[in-house]
Amino acid sequence: MDAEKRNNSQIPRTKKWLREALIELMKKKPYSQITITELAQRADLSRFSFYAHYKTKDDILYDIVERIMDEQAIKLRNEKDLTILRGWELAFETWIKHKDVIVTIGKQNLLNIFRDVNEKEYMNTTQNFMTSTISKNPEFYPYYSVYHNSAMVNLTYYFLCEEPMKTPRDMAEIMLQLRPASIHTSFIQTEKT
């Protein structure tokens, strides 16, 4: 194997080690007190290796959250008969899979990273559904988007910390009940009967 191929195959593995090391350290101490040196040592890497892949600790957190959101988006895209109920159920299944990471980030008061990442993804995906609502009231969309995104992040964290935890299906049904009726019918397909 030539050096370029070997280096390319090491990049995902190195990034994975750094992501895992950061979460492990966040379980033990405040995020603000974690140093790059400590993070690199925890991953059995050098500071040079850290900086070859990331500029800051925040970059690792954004990478972690983007991977979770990408996994969720892939599940939604691959669902043959996607309904609102099934979409919520798939989302909650994804979040359960990553409960440990999400709760660790939440305990560090860093859920804003989920809001930032979700805001970009949410704006891109829901605008397609909201064409009629946006054309009637274009200033409405950014407010609804911020409102929904913030509520969703906080609700997800609450769901993951709740004991006993509800099932993804139970949470999907709760989400349908929480949505304002006017929004629900104006831009998203309703549950198939």
Image (tube, rainbow, N blue to C red):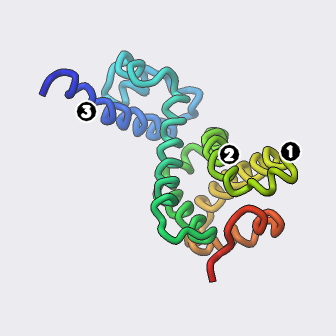
Residue at numbered disc 2: 123
Give the structural element (helix, strand or loop) at label 3.
Answer: helix
Q: Name the residue rendered at 66%, 51% in the picture.
A: 153
Q: Earlier in the sequence, mark 2 or mark 3?
A: 3
**Residue 108 can be seen in this image:** no
Q: Earlier in the sequence, mark 2 or mark 1?
A: 2
Whether tag 2 and tag 1 are in contact, CB under 8 A, the answer is no
Q: CA distance from mark 2 to mark 1?
A: 14 Å
Residue at numbered disc 1: 139
Q: Residue furthest left?
A: 1
Image quarter (top left, top right, bottom left or bottom right) of the N terminus = top left
The quarter of the displayed image where residue 192 is located: bottom right
Observer-nearest residue: 94 or 1? 1
Observer-nearest residue: 112 or 37? 112
Give the structural element (helix, strand or loop) at label 2.
Answer: helix
Residue 9: give its label: 3
**Residue 54 can be seen in this image:** yes
Q: How many marks?
A: 3
Residue 100 falls left or right of residue 128: left
Q: Of tags 2 and 3, which is closer to the observer?
A: 2
Residue 120, compared with residue 34, is above or below; it is: below
Mark 1 is on which residue type?
Glu
The x and y percentages for residue 190 are: 68, 72
The x and y percentages for residue 77 are: 50, 58
Mark 2 is on which residue type?
Met
Residue 30 falls left or right of residue 35: right
